Image (cartoon, grey):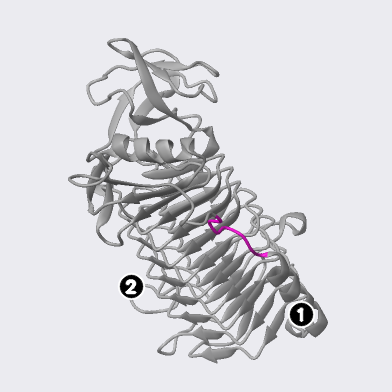
Amino acid sequence: MDIDRRFRFVASLSCLHLGLILGVASGGSFPADPKLSPEIRVGIDAGDLRGSDHRMLQAAVDYVAGLGGGTVRIEPGRYQMRNALCLRSNVRVVGEPGKSILVACNGFRTRLSADGDANERQITVEDPSGLQLGDGVAIQDRRSGGGFAVTTATLTARVDANTFRLSKPLYFDYLVSNQAAAQLVFPVVGGWNIQNAALEGLTIEGNRAHSESLDGCRGGGIYLFECDSVAIRNCVVREYKGDGISFQVSHHVTIEDCLAERNGGLGLHPGSGSQYPILRRNRSIGNDQDGLFVCWRVQHGVFEQNELCGNKRNGISIGHKDTDNRFTKNIIASNGEAGILFRDESEAMGAHRNVFEDNHLLNNGKTSKGEAAFASIVIRGSHNNLIFRRNTIGHSNPVPGPGFLVSTVARDLTSEQNQFTNVSREVATAEK
């Protein structure tokens, strides 16, 4: 199929896509009237509750949740975390920007000395010296690798010197023969199976240099799993040894005015079937992987006015069944690989009907010598009915790379009113 056939104007279709997205992308706001809801302050030296670690913060959140909801205000200070601050339904957690700081503790890792069996609620470790009751831990082995195969839980009791009870059953068998291990590692703030909650004005320091690693399926500096209508606003996550902000199987999540920088994984990671996300005015900068990784089955999302710059992989990565999303007025610059990457998928699993308008893609994919290593936009596999309109695409100086590198099996693509700057050609074709 020639380039002109694959890039053609589909005006009525593009308007339909945009209307559908605008009509259904909503939610993620905190509904309670603060004048009518309980409010409690927690601080190190001041407040209704006083303490300097995750236990006091959690006590405040749980207390307000027990009243049916309200607001927890975290006073300025540095709070030491050995487990996640667990968000609760109908509770709004508010810090003072730049001053309410949650700091992850040093990590710890020990091998299991007995197999951890699926659905067992305890682990036996070789070295318990770095573990305490109440710690957040992750258990895995070499075979489980990572992702959703990792079990995350809290140490709730001590059976003997080397054996701890867990708050949750083990998801799989973790075998000593496969180098099963427990790690002291956790999301610094997390929400599991909650709704109508908000997090605002907190700074997360991930202590990356001294931490264990936890990938975005089970963790992040801020992490949500199976949640609905949660808003995260004006928060900072830096130096977490994993993703900055990750949410999985969660719907109507709003992330606004946040900063994810210098994290060891992805900057922003909506994933695993999350529907109707809104990511607006965020900055994802200098992370080790992609600035924005749109994971599997993320649909009907709005991504606008974000800054995705200086990340070591792609500015935006999108792929498996990620359909009907809108990307508008984002700055995608100086990333190590492509500005936008469509991952290689078959047509049944393609990222169809996505709209990209008024974005700026500049200086992405340069080698150490300043040459273009990737096209600004790379479309691998069979992704159909994509619309690119009024985007600025290219480089500050002339480079040999194209604007688009397009798979021969992608079809019905629209390129309209885009401005190409210092590229060798607007469109090149690749086999896949």
SS assignment for the magenta stretch, majority: loop
Residue 118 on image: x %, y %:
54, 19
Instruction: State the residue lying farthest toward the left.
Output: 45
Q: Secondary structure at mark 2?
A: loop
Left or right side of 310 for 317: right
Is 311 included in the stretch rendered in magenta? no
Amino acid bearing label 1: Cys
For the C terminus, give its image quadrant. Answer: bottom right
Residue at the location (53% across, 54% down)?
32
- Could you say which is closer to the camera, residue 366 or residue 53? 53
| Residue 97 vertical position relative to residue 241 in the rendered view, above or below | below
User: Circle 1 sits on which residue?
Assistant: 15
Circle 1 crowding by C-alpha within 10 Å: few under 14, some 14–19, many from 20: few
Numbered circle sitting on residue 44: none
User: Circle 2 sits on which residue?
Assistant: 368
Give the magenta part as a residue range.
Answer: 25-31
| Residue 114 vertical position relative to residue 54 in the rendered view, above or below | above
Q: Quadrant of residue 86?
A: top left
